[in-house]
Amino acid sequence: MAYRLVIFDFDDTLLHLDVDWKAVKADIVKLAHDAGVKVDESQNLVHMGNRLSAHHGLKAGVDGVYLKHELICAKSRSYKPFMPMLAIARELKSKGMRLGIASGNHTDSIKRILSDLGMLDAFDIICGRDATPRSKPAPDQLLLIMEKTGVKNGDVIFVGDSMHDQLSAKAAGIFLFLVHPNSSFDAARLRHELGLPKAD
């Protein structure tokens, strides 16, 4: 199928961020406690952050916690690029394809890392968790990217690695291409799906 827009997830799709997610969760729990909000500390980090953002007016605080820890990772370059996936993005851009990123990471940290990798110019729009009222698994980020690029859902493919990506794509009515982190086999499958030649 000929797509007009390819949207990528970021962490564990284009690269792996070595973020201390336990520390992120601890800071978000503290944020809730400081605001007088009780949280179930056994809850999944994504669900906890989304609930605090949606129901307790703490979105800016939650997003700030993510940014703080992701920038620690970015500044120390504690991440592992998945070169076959980045090569796909670069090739698609050279062919005039519209590219976006929809991620649970913060927009500023994504841009910082892509800039360091020389990949920032490959993407038309980068939509982190801070760019929309709701983050994944809600469809808001995907819908915003489609709105800004003017591409309808039938012409879009979303490349992601998680259940949150699956749910977001389903809610947005777009096709999800599921990958495993740093899988050369999945990168080859994606090249085939997108009509790109086999990598050397």
Image (cartoon, grey):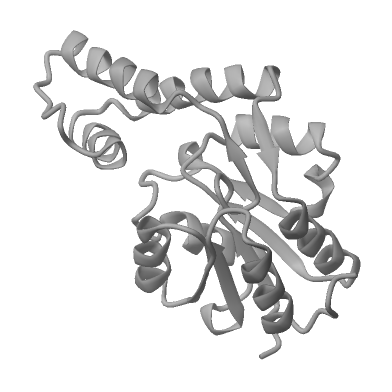
Please state which of residues 67 and 193 is positioned toward the viewer in this rendering.
Answer: 193
- Whether residue 121 sits left or right of residue 165 in the image: it is right
- Whether residue 69 sits left or right of residue 155 in the image: it is left
Q: Quadrant of the N terminus?
A: bottom right
Task: Count numbered badges in the picture.
Answer: 0
Residue sitting at x 48%, y 63%: 143
Q: Quadrant of the C terminus?
A: bottom right
- Residue 61 in view in this figure: no
- Decide: is 130 above or below 41: below
- Decide: is 10 above or below 143: above
- Whether residue 51 sits left or right of residue 1 in the image: it is left
Residue 193 position, x and y percent, is: 67, 82
Please state which of residues 144 and 84 is positioned toward the viewer in this rendering.
Answer: 84
Please state which of residues 43 and 59 is positioned toward the viewer in this rendering.
Answer: 43
Q: Residue furthest bottom?
A: 1
Please state which of residues 3 and 198 is positioned toward the viewer in this rendering.
Answer: 198
Residue sitting at x 77%, y 52%: 83
Residue sitting at x 31%, y 24%: 25
In which quadrant of the rendered view does residue 107 lie? top right
- Whether residue 46 sits left or right of residue 106 in the image: it is left
In which quadrant of the rendered view does residue 45 lie? top left
